[in-house]
């Protein structure tokens, strides 16, 4: 671990330029195997660490991260409490519930100036033991690696394995993955996590919702063989003029020199081979199909296929198989209108928080299935992931059932630029402040790298209610550098029209129908969506007919009702 930082530092908590230490670069969420799997088979290279953990609540002032004894392998944690992972500390009784809208949760109690945090800062010290499963350990013993991934946490984590510091991470709505290979040993291992309530990241996470903390999504180990497909970037295009598809994939292959070939097979979900090829392995392996006889993907007809990539060693043995479901579709803005497969699309959408009255944001797979079934039964064809990337399984369901997604970056800074209904642009975070640019670009990068291959994702969103500024220009440019095809959405530019260029779509909240109609009659360059409208919390949702009537204008392309489910805790 000579090239890694091996000592934790409390200074990172208030330094916005430090948002990840030793974190694995963001990558696609393709599934890997040690063999050729059946369609739908779970990975044999992953191991869940969900279940009962031990936990102790302390204040930030009570711990020394550089010498913290709780992280030691032989630390006696018998006096710690118990908590299920995934879950929230509040729901387990370790912290009090808070609901905050525009202001920050410390407002009226303490007055830290960004990027600093309140002195009252809870820290949850988590610990659990684990033994690496034989199938994962075999990869480690044969020159591969093992990582630990925290799929969701709030707000910042320091991680140790067997007393060895392995990493620090913020942005708890995209994976925080750390290579722990060198810290592991045979037999029982110990993972320790210090999960902080507040960090500089808290200034970017002022969403209007229950403020819930802890390890609230799954934690898992994953093994990577000595030759490993680190990333798959798949373009599955469909040409409406020829009614044919084409596949263009770029694979990042670690230690490609130790492999002979990479073979790729495209199958329908019944297992029928549509197309296949084989080529020599290289660090960047490109796969290009040419014209394919495939069905297009849409919400009404969500046709899916599976791309299966097999890495073959020089001895002819299978080293690794990677699978990725794909849907062939083309989504573009043409002549100021968003079109899917050559036809105008209208979003009959809702804004959705991940939420359950008992579990908070630690929702289950069944919760997601229930939500998507409700959407399909009630003709909801689109969801905006307000205001953060969702659990990965949600995207799989949206691909399978047919739901259009606006995938939204984990960012809302409402309380930094609005006080008593008065806007103060000069105090906005991130605004045009260069110290925040890295963290904000990292957040959209992490989301896009993870979710790129999902056909359900039609639009990328830079975040919510965070004003405007040069940082958003950097985020918009980064998004289009990664993905030149999908449009980028951001509503906040309405507060400063000098930054109209940071959004490819005109997007407003709660605009009256007549105001929208004025825009549509002005020969606009951009299509229009209502990213929030109707406000359906409680007894409301009147005047819907006025918005539906706007659909006679081709550039009015629907909207997203706030919101999908009321946030209430039993």
Image (spheres, helix red, strand yellow):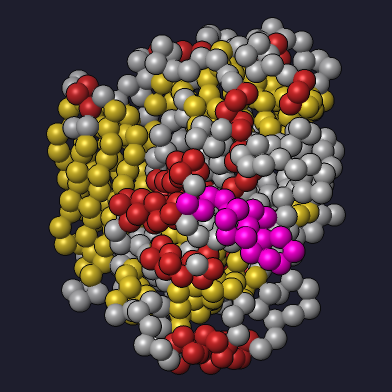
Judge left or right: residue 305 versus residue 559.
left
Q: Is residue 224 above or below residue 263?
A: above
**Residue 560 at x, y percent in the picture:** 57, 72
Q: Residues in magenta?
A: 415-432
**Residue 392 at x, y percent in the picture:** 52, 48
**Residue 370 at x, y percent in the picture:** 64, 61
Instruction: Check if residue 416 falls in the magenta segment.
Output: yes
Q: Quadrant of the C terminus?
A: bottom right
Can residue 87 be seen in this snapshot? no
Judge left or right: residue 216 versus residue 488.
right
Viewer-side residue, 515 vs 209: 515
**Residue 265 at x, y percent in the picture:** 25, 47
Q: Quadrant of the N terminus?
A: top left
Instruction: Check if residue 7 falls in the magenta segment.
Output: no
Q: Residue at x 53, y 92 (%)?
A: 549
Quadrant in the rendering for residue 57: top right
Viewer-side residue, 438 vs 386: 438
Q: Residue at x 49, y 27 (%)?
A: 21
Q: Is residue 76 above or below residue 237?
A: above
Quadrant in the rendering for residue 442: top left
Q: Residue at x 51, y 14 (%)?
A: 6
């Amino acid at each position: 671990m000579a090239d890694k930082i091996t000592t934790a530092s409390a200074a990172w908590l208030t330094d916005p330029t430090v948002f990840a230490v030793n974190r694995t670069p963001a990558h696609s969420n393709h599934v890997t195997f040690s063999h050729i799997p059946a369609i739908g088979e779970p990975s044999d290279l992953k191991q869940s660490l969900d279940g009962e953990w031990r936990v102790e609540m302390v204040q930030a002032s009570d711990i020394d991260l550089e010498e913290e004894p709780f992280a030691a392998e032989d630390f006696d944690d018998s006096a710690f409490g118990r908590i299920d992972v995934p879950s929230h500390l509040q729901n387990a009784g370790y912290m009090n519930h808070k609901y905050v809208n525009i202001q920050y949760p410390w407002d009226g109690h303490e007055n830290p100036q960004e990027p600093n945090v309140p002195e009252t800062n809870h820290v949850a010290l988590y610990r659990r033991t684990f033994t690496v499963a034989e199938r994962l350990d075999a990869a480690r013993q044969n020159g591969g690696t093992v990582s630990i991934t925290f799929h969701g946490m709030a707000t910042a984590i320091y991680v140790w394995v067997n007393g060895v510091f392995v990493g620090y991470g913020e942005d708890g709505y995209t994976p925080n993955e750390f290579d722990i290979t060198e810290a592991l040993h045979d037999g029982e291992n110990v993972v320790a996590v210090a999960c902080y309530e507040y960090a500089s990241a808290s200034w970017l996470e002022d969403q209007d919702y229950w403020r819930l903390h802890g390890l609230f999504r799954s934690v898992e180990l994953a093994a990577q063989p000595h030759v490993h497909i680190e990333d798959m970037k798949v373009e599955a295009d469909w040409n409406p003029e020829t009614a044919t598809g084409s596949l263009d994939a770029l694979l990042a292959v670690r230690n490609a020199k130790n492999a002979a070939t990479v073979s790729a097979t495209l199958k329908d979900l019944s297992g029928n081979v549509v197309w296949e090829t084989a080529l020599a392995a290289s660090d960047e392996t490109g796969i290009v199909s040419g014209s394919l006889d495939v069905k297009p993907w849409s919400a009404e007809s969500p046709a899916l296929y599976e791309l299966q990539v097999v890495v073959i060693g020089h001895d002819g043995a299978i080293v690794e198989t990677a699978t990725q479901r794909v849907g062939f579709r083309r989504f573009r803005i043409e002549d100021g209108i968003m079109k899917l497969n050559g036809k105008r699309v209208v979003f009959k959408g809702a804004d959705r928080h991940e939420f359950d009255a008992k579990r908070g944001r630690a929702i289950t797979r069944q919760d997601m299935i229930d939500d998507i079934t409700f959407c399909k039964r009630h003709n909801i064809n689109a969801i905006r992931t307000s205001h953060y990337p969702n659990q990965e399984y949600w995207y799989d369901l949206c691909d399978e059932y047919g739901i259009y997604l606006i995938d939204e970056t984990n960012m809302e800074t409402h309380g930094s630029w609005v006080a008593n209904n008065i806007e103060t642009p000069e105090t906005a975070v991130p605004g045009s402040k260069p110290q925040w640019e890295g963290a904000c670009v990292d957040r959209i990068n992490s989301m896009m790298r993870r979710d790129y291959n999902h056909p359900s994702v039609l639009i990328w969103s830079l975040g919510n209610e965070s004003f405007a500024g040069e940082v958003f220009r950097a985020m918009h440019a980064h998004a289009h550098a990664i993905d030149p095809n999908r449009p980028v959405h951001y509503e906040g530019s309405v507060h400063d029209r000098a930054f109209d260029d940071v959004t490819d779509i005109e997007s407003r909240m709660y605009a009256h129908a007549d105001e929208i109609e004025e825009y549509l009659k002005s020969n606009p360059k951009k299509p229009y969506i209502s990213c929030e409208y109707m406000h359906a919390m409680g007894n409301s949702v009147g005047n819907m007919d006025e918005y539906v009537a706007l659909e006679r204008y081709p550039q009015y392309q629907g909207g997203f009702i706030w919101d999908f489910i009321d946030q209430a805790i039993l």
